[in-house]
């Protein structure tokens, strides 16, 4: 029996914007909205420099039929953030199991990494 791996995108929210899937990227100031008492309906916060990575990962996850998880390193606990800083893996990156890829991978490169991770 094989475990189905999901695709995880690690990023650090230096610049802020909201990601609603392929529908679009909307700039948002979350701190401003909190001060004004507005509720934010956006799902995830993704910096613009990681958007190419996220779009490629989303296309690959749909084609593979696996889950896509967006992980903002700045939202992790202190211990988890320290582990991320000390493990030497780049941010932003796509992680599948123990393997990862950074830069601007295409959908096909992510799918290839997924199949390698399964074996």
Image (tube, rainbow, N blue to C red):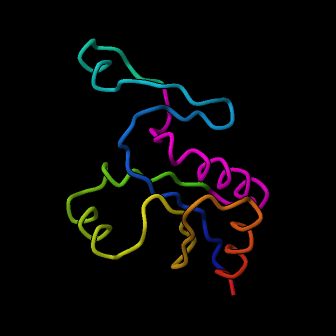
Camera-side residue of 8 and 85: 85
Camera-side residue of 8 and 12: 12
Q: Residue furthest left?
A: 78
Q: Position of residue 77 (x, y in %)?
A: 24, 57
Q: Position of residue 17 (x, y in %)?
A: 46, 32
Residue 50 vertical position relative to residue 31 in the rendered view, above or below: below
User: Does the magenta portion include 66?
Assistant: yes
Relative side of 112 to 6, left or right? right
Q: Residue furthest top?
A: 36
Q: Residue at x 57, y 44 (%)?
A: 51
Q: Residue at x 63, y 30 (%)?
A: 24
Relative side of 103 to 88, left or right? right
Q: Residue furthest bottom?
A: 119
Relative side of 87 to 112, left or right? left
Q: Position of residue 78 (x, y in %)?
A: 20, 59
Kindly indicate the quadrant of the structure image that contains residue 15: top left
Q: Residue at x 38, y 50 (%)?
A: 12
Kindly indicate the quadrant of the structure image that contains residue 31: top left
User: Does the magenta portion include 18?
Assistant: no
Quarter of the figure with the C terminus: bottom right
Give, as a single range, the part of the protein colored magenta.
42-67
Quarter of the figure with the N terminus: bottom right
Camera-side residue of 30 and 118: 30
Relative side of 44 to 30, left or right? right
Q: Residue at x 50, y 35 (%)?
A: 43
Name the magenta segment's main secondary structure: helix
């Amino acid at each position: 029996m094989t475990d189905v791996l999901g695709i995880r995108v690690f990023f650090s929210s230096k610049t802020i914007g909201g990601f609603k899937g392929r529908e679009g990227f909307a700039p948002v100031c979350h701190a401003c909205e909190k001060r004004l008492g507005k509720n934010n309906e956006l799902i995830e916060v993704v910096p613009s420099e990681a958007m190419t990575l996220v779009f490629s990962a989303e296309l690959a996850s749909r084609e593979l039929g696996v889950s896509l998880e967006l992980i903002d390193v700045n939202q992790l606990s202190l211990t988890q953030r320290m582990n991320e800083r000390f493990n030497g893996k780049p941010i932003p990156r796509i992680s599948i199991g123990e393997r990862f890829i950074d830069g601007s991978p295409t959908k096909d490169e992510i799918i290839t990494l997924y199949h390698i991770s399964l074996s």
